[in-house]
Image (cartoon, rainbow, N blue to C red):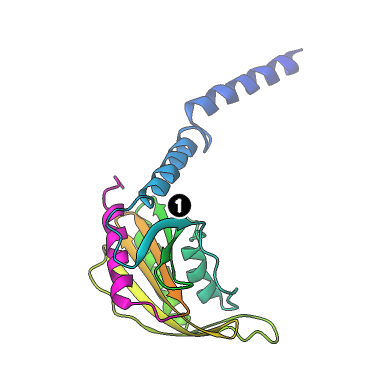
Amino acid sequence: MRIIGGAVCAVAACLVAALAGCGGGGEAAQHAALDAGRLKVLLGGIDDLPQGFSDHQRERWRPPFRAKSDACRALFDAAAGRPPTRDLVAGTATTYEGQHVGETAAVGLAVYGDNAAGGVLDRLERAMRSCRVAAAGGAGKGDRLRASRLRIKGVGDGVEARRFKGRVGGYPYEMHLVVARQGGALITLVHGGVASPDVKGTAALARVLAGRVSTLDL
């Protein structure tokens, strides 16, 4: 009976502790959930989107192919809402439509704790330097995008960008990939399509997103 009674007490104690927010759940989990909701709202209903972008949103971006390089895959994953998970507090992702056929702007937004966002940006910058050619794995896969530097300035607290150009599915394809830090948040933007995306539009959208993120209490 003592064992049973002890077990009941232990269960009750765990329930009380969980409600109080200990053990990695409770308040921490609720805080993360609230932040994820705030991030999703933040990316919706942007009135000052640059010309050429629609506020009509789609689901999170799906990369045009699975890159065989770990470095390239890490970059694509961040834009698709799968950022590095260490010290990650909350994240979300969405896709805006552009004015040209097949043109999209995918955004991944991730908030980090313990001042980790700068380190994550450093890791993704290293991934950019390593990802010189993004190519699909497997025999007979012709999807291939060659990377080159893309100069974008004045975005958040730090920014790095690349242009990826080549062929996907047998058709010409080009996209701009931008990674920027704003406070404790990391923004990953992919603007691409069959037609060459406008660099000024990419930069303008990145600045608008960084401005929105700056309104968060991070």
Residue that label 1 marks: 91
Outermost residue to the right = 1
Residue 117 falls within the magenta-colored stretch: no
- Span highlighted in magenta in the image: 195-218
Q: Residue at x 47, y 40 (%)?
A: 33
Horizontal and vertical percent position of residue 92: 46, 53
* Residue 145 horizontal side relative to residue 39, left or right: right
Horizontal and vertical percent position of residue 57: 45, 56
Amino acid on which the number 1 mark rests in the picture? Gly
Horizontal and vertical percent position of residue 67: 58, 76
What secondary structure characterizes most of the magenta part? Answer: helix
Q: Residue at x 27, y 64 (%)?
A: 207
Horizontal and vertical percent position of residue 37: 43, 43
Q: Residue at x 68, y 18 (%)?
A: 8
* Residue 110 horizontal side relative to residue 211, left or right: right
The front one of 108 and 29 is 108
Q: Is residue 192 above or below residue 95?
A: below
Task: Tell me the element at label 1.
Answer: strand
Q: Residue at x 52, y 36 (%)?
A: 25
Question: In which quadrant of the rendered view does residue 185 lie?
Answer: bottom left
Number of on-image labels: 1
Q: Residues within 10 Å of mark 1 (few under 14, many from 20)?
A: many
Question: In which quadrant of the rendered view does residue 163 lie?
Answer: bottom left
Outermost residue to the top = 1
Q: Is residue 163 above or below residue 215?
A: below
Q: Is residue 59 above or below residue 155?
A: above
* Residue 78 horizontal side relative to residue 185, left or right: right
Q: In which quadrant of the rendered image does the N terminus lie?
A: top right
Q: Is residue 115 above or below residue 28?
A: below
The front one of 59 and 186 is 59
